[in-house]
Amino acid sequence: MSLSIIGCVVNGPGEALMTDIGFTGGGAGSGMVYLAGKQDHKMSNDQMVDHIVGLVEERAAKLDAEAAAADAAE
């Protein structure tokens, strides 16, 4: 899993396009969340940490389930 959290509104979007989960600063107390390299939704900075942690945990659970299914298929 790849994750990017970049405060720069100039460089952040380019970095976030290459990650599974990304957050870029945007000023005015909010930033943009990227999922699978695509701009997804806006998030306030004060909620960002909990939100990103939740997204990472969801993605990790999905990856673990996919790995378990692949192991079971072997």
Image (tube, grey):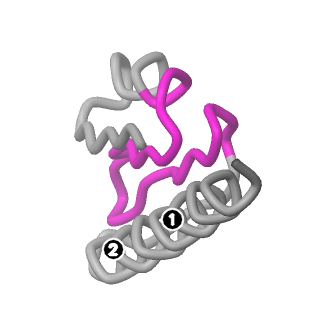
Across and down, in percent, residue 48 comes to: 34, 72
Choose top left, top right, bottom left or bottom right for residue 36.
top right
User: 72 or 7: nearer the eye?
Assistant: 72
Q: Residue at x 52, y 41 (%)?
A: 20
From the viewer's perspective, is residue 29 above or below residue 31?
Answer: below
Of callouts 1 and 2, the N-terminal one: 2
- Tag shown at residue 53: 2
**Is residue 29 on the magenta stretch?**
yes
Residue positioned most to the front:
74
| Range of magenta residues | 16-39
Disc 1 to disc 2, C-alpha distance: 16 Å
Looking at the rendered image, the disc whose residue lies closer to the viewer, 1 or 2, is 1
Does residue 60 sit above or below 24 in this rendering?
below
Where on the picture, by quarter, is residue 60? bottom left
CB contact under 8 Å: marks 1 and 2: no
User: Is residue 24 highlighted in magenta?
Assistant: yes
Left or right of 48, for residue 62: right
62 or 15: nearer the viewer: 62
Is 50 or 8 nearer to us in this picture? 50
- Percent position of residue 28, x then y: 36, 59
Left or right side of 58 for 44 = left
Q: Residue at x 26, y 30 (%)?
A: 8
Name the residue at the right extreme. 73
Q: Which residue is mark 1?
A: 64
Name the foreground residue: 26 vs 12. 12
Residue 38's place in the image compared with 12, above or below, is: below
Q: Secondary structure at mark 2?
A: helix
Q: Amino acid at mark 2?
A: Val
